[in-house]
Image (spheres, grey):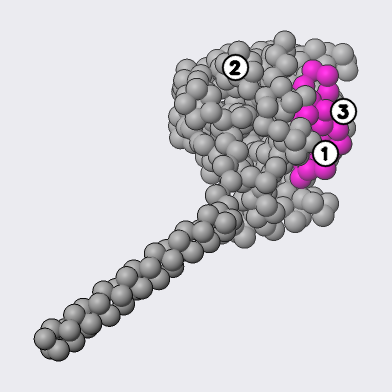
Amino acid sequence: MINLLRVGARLVRALSRRRLARALSLSHLAAAASLAISAPLAAAPAEPIRIGEIEPLTGKEAAFGQSAHRGVKMAIDEINARGGVLGRPLAVVVEDNQSKPGDSATVAKKLIAREKVVALVSGGTSSNCLEIAPIAQGAKIPFISTTATAPEVTEKRDYVFRTCFIDPFQGAVLAKFAAGTLKAKRVAVLTSVSASYSVGLSKVFREKFGALGGTIAIEQKYAEGDKDFRAQLTAIKAAKPDAIAATGFYTEAALICKQARDLGLNIPIFGGDGWEAPELIEIGGKAVEGTYYASHYSSASTAPEVADFVKRYRARHNGETPDSMAPLAYDAVMILADALARAGSTDSAKLRAAFAATKDFPGVTGRTTIDPQRNATKSAVMLAVKNGQVAYVETIAP
């Protein structure tokens, strides 16, 4: 009987200890739950602000697109390193239009509808940007062209902007250069009729050069992608001009220079910013020595903002010197970030209004003011090819 009582007592004590342990365990769990509820949750990463970029990354205009993309990426990296905009990082969604007609419109629709970008940026040609502009306008998404100089890109579209000068100004620059610096009286004009840029630039050049007392000796035409210009150049040689204005892009310009020299045409040849690409010298070689073209900046400038940009760019790209496409795109993204900050929102109407109000923004390519037609007011420079390198000639103000 005593043994049974002892066993019973032990059982009671064991059960009591289990109940106590269970009670303590529940108490700890409750306390932990209470702490978890009362403790602040870790902040979730801020949702990035998405920007759409459309470039000719491949195809015949790839030099433009690759350079512009490097400028966009450099700007975004620097902005994010400073904490982003509105407490959020910037993210770029890139699409390649492959230098093909129609592709810019297709990818613009994709970026707006699927990727939900707050703005579009493009370093493509005027033809590329003329595809994007009506789509951006219809969707009321701000679109910034960094290199399209054709006036009609921004005309009648209050959501479409550019951060480069336009063809009427560039055409006037070329006319002043031909008449003033080259002292040319008669100039032959060679136009790419399949490029809006070239057609517009030639038109303004003819008008401005004529107003300065010059004469268009002859005008010849070709299409993008052509490789043989001997017939046009033979006709030009017969007209005996003092210089040739070739208003197309770098690939054709380089071939035109080679074939002109082969035909004994050793007069000055010049063009617009469509010439600016390393391929001009790679393809043209000695034939482009002594040729000239307009641009948006000179990497040889001693201005602190230019020198600093060139230094940072070279550090990122194995010592490569940036052409104007990179700083133009860089400036465009910096202005866009500034507009986002001033708007205080990613709302498209507020962002559009803030971008339109940009005044004297200090950039690598000069101080940018967006005028009432949504174009940039800024100077141009004339560059020359000398000893296989690009050299600064002069600056021509608006």
Identity of the residue furthest to the front in this view: 1
Tell me: 151 left or right of 94. Answer: right
Distance from Cα at disc 3 to Cα at disc 1? 17 Å
Does residue 188 show up magenta in the picture?
no
Label disc, if present, on residue 139 of the rendered structure: 2
Q: Amino acid at mark 2?
A: Ala
Does residue 370 show up magenta in the picture?
yes
Q: Which residues are magenta?
A: 354-381
Q: Nearer the viewer, mark 2 or mark 1?
A: 2
Q: Amino acid at mark 1?
A: Phe
The residue nearer to you, when weighing 212 against 150, is 150
Label disc, if present, on residue 361 of the rendered structure: 1
Whether tag 3 and tag 1 are in contact, CB under 8 A, the answer is no
Q: Secondary structure at mark 2?
A: helix
Whichever of labels 3 and 1 marks the residue nearer the N terminus, that label is 1
Whichever of labels 2 and 1 marks the residue nearer the N terminus, that label is 2
Q: Secondary structure at mark 3?
A: loop
Label disc, if present, on residue 268 of the rendered structure: none
* Residue 96 x, y percent position in the rendering: 47, 32
* Residue plotted at (79% across, 51% down): 305
Is residue 316 among the parts visible in the rendering?
Answer: yes
* Residue 223 x, y percent position in the rendering: 52, 17
Whether tag 2 and tag 1 are in contact, CB under 8 A, the answer is no
* Residue 350 x, y percent position in the rendering: 74, 26
* Residue plotted at (63% across, 22% down): 141
Identity of the residue furthest to the top in this view: 156
Q: Amino acid at mark 3?
A: Pro
Q: Nearer the viewer, mark 3 or mark 2?
A: 2
Q: Nearer the viewer, mark 3 or mark 1?
A: 1
What crowding class fits label 1: few (fewer than 14 Cα within 10 Å), some (14-19), or many (20 or more)? some
Count the numbered circles shown.
Answer: 3
Label disc, if present, on residue 398 of the rendered structure: 3
